Image (cartoon, rainbow, N blue to C red):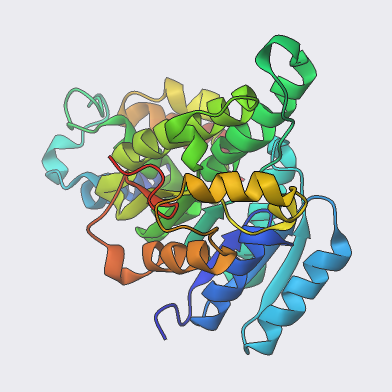
C-alpha cells in the first residue's frame, strides 16, 4: 500500500465524516482548527479509520492525532 | 412489535426488576443478553422465559465493576447478535447502614457496582451504538437518589450519581442519535422488600400517594417505552415510577 493510496482513502473518510471540501483536507490541516471537528467527530473518525484499515488505534495514540498527516503516518507505521 | 429485530443488553437480569425488564423487551420482540453476577440458575431461568416468547437470549456472567470483563461481554454480544440497540443498566447491590458506622468497603462496593458499573458498561456499549448512529440507554436510578434515605448513604450517592451520569452522557451523544434516560423506581415488590416486616411495609405505603407498592412490571413498562421509537424526542430525563412519592 503506497502512501498515496493511504492519503486518498483517509481524505475520502474525512470528507464523508466531516462534510468538508476535499481541497481543504491537506496533509498539514488540523482536524480541530482547520476542519472544524469536535472531540466526538474525532472519536468517530478514529473508529472509521480502524474499520477501513483494519487496525486498532489506542486512546492514547488517538489523542496525539492532530492533523491529516498524523493519521497517514500513523497508518503507514501500523498497518498490518 | 415495537422492538422487533432489536438487541437489548440488561445487566442484573436474573431476578427482580432486571428480569421483568428483560422479559418485557423480549415480549416486544427484542433479543436479550441476560447479564448476571451470582446466580447462574436464575439467569438460565430468565433466559428460558425469554426463549418462550420466541426471542433469542444469551446468558453472560460478568461483574460490571470490572472493565475488562465488561468489554468482553460487549464484544461477545456483538459477535453473537451483530449489534446492541438497547442497554439497560439495572444491576445494583445494597450495603445499608448508618453513615457513621458505614465501612469504607461497603461504600466502595456499592459505588463500584451501582455507579462505576454504569459508566463502564455505557462506555463499552456506546462505541457500537455510535457506529450504528442509534441507540437507547436506560439507567435504573431510584427514588432515594432524588429524596435521600437514612441508612443508605452509599446507595443514594450512587443513584444520584447515576442521574447526573445520565444527563452528561445524554448531552455527549445526543447528536449521534443515541438517547440516554433514567427511571427512578420507588418501593417495588421484589425479594428485597418481601423480607420486610408487615409494619415496615405499612409505613412505606403511607408515604405513597397511590397507596401500594409497585411491581417490577410497572418499571419494565416504562423502560420498554424508553427503549422504543415512541420516546425518540426524550433524552437526559429521569422518570419516577414511585406511586407519586417524589412528585414536586
Looking at the rendering, which quadrant does residue B228 occupy? bottom left
Q: Is residue B217 above or below residue B147?
A: below
Considering the image in quadrants, where does the C terminus of chain B appear?
top left
- Residue A60 to residue B91: above or below: above
- In the picture, the quarter occupied by the N terminus of chain B is bottom left
On the question of residue B165 being in view, the answer is no
Q: Quadrant for residue A24, please give it.
A: top left
Query: Where residue B87 appears, x then y in whole percent?
Result: 52, 56
Q: Position of residue B90 (x, y in %)?
A: 59, 51
Q: Residue at x 74, y 16 (%)?
A: B102
Left or right: residue B109 versus residue B152 is: right
- Residue at 16% x, 26% y is A34
Q: Nearer the viewer, residue B90 or B245?
A: B245
Residue at 45 percent across and 46 percent down: it is A47
Front residue of A48/B171: it is: B171
> How many discs mark residues in the rendered view?
0
Query: Whole-percent x and y of residue A1?
Result: 49, 48
Q: Quadrant of residue B71?
A: top right
Residue closest to the eye, B121 or B142 = B142
Q: Position of residue B154 (x, y in %)?
A: 63, 24
Please state if B203 lies on the left or on the right of A76 as rendered: right
Q: Residue at x 29, y 49 (%)?
A: B235
Can residue B166 be seen by looking at this rendering? yes
In the image, residue B83 sits, relative to residue B75, either above or below, namely: below
Amino acid at each position: 500500500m503506497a502512501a498515496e493510496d493511504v492519503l486518498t482513502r483517509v481524505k475520502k473518510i474525512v470528507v464523508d465524516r466531516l462534510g468538508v471540501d476535499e481541497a481543504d483536507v491537506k496533509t498539514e490541516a488540523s482536524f480541530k482548527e482547520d476542519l472544524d471537528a469536535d472531540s466526538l467527530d474525532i472519536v468517530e473518525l478514529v473508529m472509521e479509520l480502524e474499520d477501513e484499515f483494519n487496525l486498532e488505534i489506542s486512546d492514547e495514540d488517538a489523542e496525539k492525532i492532530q492533523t491529516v498527516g498524523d493519521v497517514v503516518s500513523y497508518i503507514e507505521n501500523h498497518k498490518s | 412489535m415495537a422492538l422487533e429485530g432489536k438487541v437489548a443488553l440488561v445487566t442484573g437480569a436474573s431476578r427482580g426488576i432486571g428480569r421483568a425488564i428483560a422479559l418485557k423487551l423480549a415480549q416486544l420482540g427484542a433479543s436479550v443478553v441476560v447479564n448476571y453476577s451470582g446466580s447462574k440458575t436464575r439467569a438460565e431461568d430468565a433466559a428460558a422465559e425469554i426463549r418462550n416468547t420466541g426471542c433469542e437470549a444469551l446468558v453472560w456472567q460478568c461483574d460490571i465493576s470490572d472493565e475488562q470483563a465488561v468489554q468482553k461481554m460487549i464484544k461477545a454480544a456483538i459477535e453473537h447478535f451483530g449489534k446492541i440497540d438497547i442497554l439497560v443498566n439495572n444491576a445494583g447491590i445494597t450495603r445499608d447502614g448508618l453513615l457513621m458506622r458505614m465501612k469504607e468497603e461497603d461504600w466502595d462496593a456499592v459505588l463500584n457496582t451501582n455507579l462505576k458499573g454504569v459508566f463502564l458498561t455505557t462506555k463499552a456499549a456506546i462505541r457500537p451504538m455510535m457506529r450504528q448512529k442509534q441507540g437507547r440507554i436506560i439507567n435504573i436510578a431510584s427514588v432515594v437518589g432524588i429524596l435521600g434515605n437514612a441508612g443508605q448513604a452509599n446507595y443514594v450517592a450512587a443513584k444520584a450519581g447515576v442521574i447526573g451520569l445520565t444527563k452528561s452522557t445524554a448531552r455527549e451523544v445526543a447528536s449521534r442519535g443515541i438517547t440516554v434516560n433514567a427511571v427512578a423506581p420507588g418501593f417495588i415488590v421484589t425479594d428485597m422488600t418481601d423480607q420486610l416486616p408487615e409494619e415496615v411495609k405499612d409505613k412505606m405505603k403511607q408515604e405513597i400517594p397511590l397507596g401500594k407498592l409497585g411491581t417490577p412490571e410497572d418499571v419494565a413498562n416504562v423502560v420498554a417505552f424508553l427503549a422504543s421509537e415512541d420516546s425518540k424526542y426524550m433524552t437526559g430525563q429521569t422518570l419516577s415510577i414511585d406511586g407519586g412519592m417524589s412528585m414536586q
